[in-house]
Image: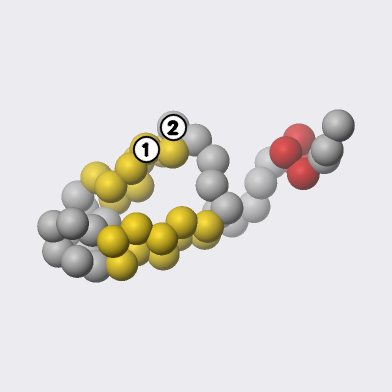
Amino acid sequence: MHDIRCGHCARKLASVNRFDTLQIKCPRCGTINHLKAPSFPPASREHP
């Protein structure tokens, strides 16, 4: 699990296992945080 924190005030916004793209507005400072996963592990790209 990874903690997602605001890039401006460092408030914890979420805990996630996996994500492709994520956009969260911080309730404390109002900053909109854009996050994108660099890549998925090879096992998740293959479909059974």
Q: Is residue 38 left or right of residue 9?
A: right
Whether residue 17 is visible to the viewer of this picture, yes or no, is: yes
Vertical order, 42 against 7 (above or below)? above
**In this view of the protein, which residue sits in the foreground, 42 or 21?**
21
Determine crowd level at label 2: few under 14, some 14-19, many 20+ residues with C-alpha closer than 10 A: few
Q: Which residue is mark 1?
A: 15
> Of helix, strand and loop, which one carries label 1?
strand
Residue drawn 23% across the image and 58% down it: 26
User: Which is more N-terminal, label 2 or label 1?
Assistant: 2
Residue drawn 52% across the image and 57% down it: 21
Residue 1 on image: x %, y %: 44, 32
Q: Residue extending furthest right?
A: 48
Residue drawn 82% across the image and 40% down it: 46
Q: Which residue is mark 2?
A: 1
Contact, mark 1 vs mark 2 (Cβ under 8 Å) = yes
**In this view of the protein, which residue sits in the foreground, 14 or 8?**
14
> CA separation, marks 1 and 2?
6 Å
Identify the amino acid type marked 2: Met
